Amino acid sequence: MKQHGGGDVSQRIATISAHLNPHKLQFELCILNICAYNHNLKMERSSGLESAICRAKGGAPGFRVAILGAAGGIGQPLSMLMKMNPLVSLLHLYDVANTPGVTSDISHMDTSAVVRGFLGPQQLENALTGMDLVIIPAGVPRKPGMTRDDLFNINAGIVKTLCEGVAKCCSKAIVNIISNPVNSTVPIAAEVFKKSGTYDPRRLLGVTMLDVVRANTFVAEVLGLDPREVDVPVVGGHAGVSILPLLSQMKPTCSFTSEETAYLTSRIQNGGTEVVEAKAGAGSATLSMAYAAVKFADACLRGLRGDANVIECAFVPSTVTELPFFASKVRLGRNGIEEIYPLGPLNESERVGLEMAKKELAGSIEKGVSFATK
Ligand SMILES: NC(=O)c1ccc[n+]([C@@H]2O[C@H](COP(=O)([O-])OP(=O)(O)OC[C@H]3O[C@@H](n4cnc5c(N)ncnc54)[C@H](O)[C@@H]3O)[C@@H](O)[C@H]2O)c1
Ligand SMILES: O=C(O)C[C@H](O)C(=O)O
């Protein structure tokens, strides 16, 4: 269709009005009105008046969420899914690269959350100011042959810097840490918050939801169930043997042979490595992680809203064991973590697994603490 400019619209209307076919006249007038509107819109945009015609923006009730590392493999689908969450009114996307493109793309989705992009350290404070929830997937992922701990040297510094920003700009926000090694990055975050005098252990959560998502999926496969009907608590931490699925406490109640238990425990503990090897150097889990992160973030937001009985597993500051951090079931509420549940009765193989998990965790926690306090 020929593009109509805005300037000669009145003249065109007069010319068309001279024709007496009423249907055609109405259609042409309608097209011209749209063209005139678009033309004016373009003029207003180019003269910086876009905000004047977007009065409702930012007006929807909801929570303000920042994603740090938003342009990455996890960050992009996570940003997209958070834009779809009706509990979010404002979504801040921060990264050290590529945020303008990701922000422009996601901002065209016709959901209510308003999206803003922030690029580079000089924009970190603006990205964080006023946020209710900060989700951190910033940092490098594994390649085949690496452990999560091999990421420590790069990711520890990234998480430390980003948490310093949180302490300065939104110290009351709930913080969800995804960056690996989670068993060390969460203790690093705690030390940063302690140093700044803003530490509230109820607001710091390491995201271990992917372990639960995998456990539900793999158990459902073995039992021939719908994964949505399965709920397996996974406790401990988020690396190797520190990932401890409690199959004896799953819902619905089921019993497993020792072969099934060994297969499922190993598959859940090595789920991350399974993806790293399948991606063959192109990174680690991103899509299932974004799904898990959104499931977890949504639970945090429902807790903040005051919903009852919001219970998920997470790696948190804890007194459930003698270790200062441990993943277990927590109840989320208006202040973040409202309650941390004890481990409950364990069977013999889970008791053995717990000792191995604690041994693995102790060193990783200590490594994070000494990095942040040195
Ligand atoms: N907790 C979990 O269950 C889980 C699951 C999967 C991956 N991870 C971890 O999540 C992290 C990210 O994985 P990915 O696949 O998205 O990696 P990626 O490399 O695709 O993306 C990381 C993003 O972080 C950004 N970034 C780097 N330094 C930054 C900084 N200082 N500030 C802000 N952004 C910064 C990069 O620019 C990039 O866009 C890795 O550490 C990975 O191991 C955790
Ligand atoms: O395995 C990884 O390195 C990424 C993540 O921790 C996962 O469990 O998929």
Image: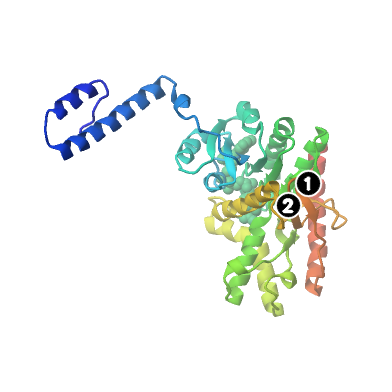
The answer to whether residue 2 is above or below residue 217 is above
Assign the C terminus to one quadrant of the image.
Answer: top right
Q: Which residue is mark 2?
A: 332
Residue drawn at the location 49% of the way across and 29% of the way down: 55
Along the line of sight, the residue nearer the viewer: 92 or 25: 25
Q: Position of residue 166 (x, y in %)?
A: 71, 35
Residue at image location 74% in from the left, 37% down from the top: 172
Give residue 130's position: percent from left, percent from top: 66, 33
Q: Name the residue rendered at 49%, 38% in the picture.
A: 102
Q: Quick one: SS at disc 2?
A: strand
Q: Nearer the viewer, mark 2 or mark 1?
A: 2
Looking at the picture, how far across and down is residue 148, in whole percent?
Answer: 68, 51
Q: Is the C-beta separation of discs 2 and 1 under 8 Å?
A: no
Residue positioned 68% across, 49% down in the render: 300
Q: Position of residue 224 (x, y in %)?
A: 57, 76
- Residue 288 lies, with reference to residue 351, above or below; the image says above
| Residue found at the far bottom of this picture | 257
Read off the residue under disc 1: 202
> Which three-letter amino acid code belongs to the residue tagged 1?
Arg
Callout 2 amino acid = Leu
Residue 239's place in the image compared with 254, above or below, is above
Frontmost residue, 312 versus 157? 312
Q: Could one spot residue 317 in this view of the protein?
A: yes
Question: Where does ligand 1 appear, by image quarter?
Answer: top right
Residue 238 quadrant = bottom right
Q: Is residue 143 visible?
A: no
Disc nearer the start of the sequence (2/1): 1
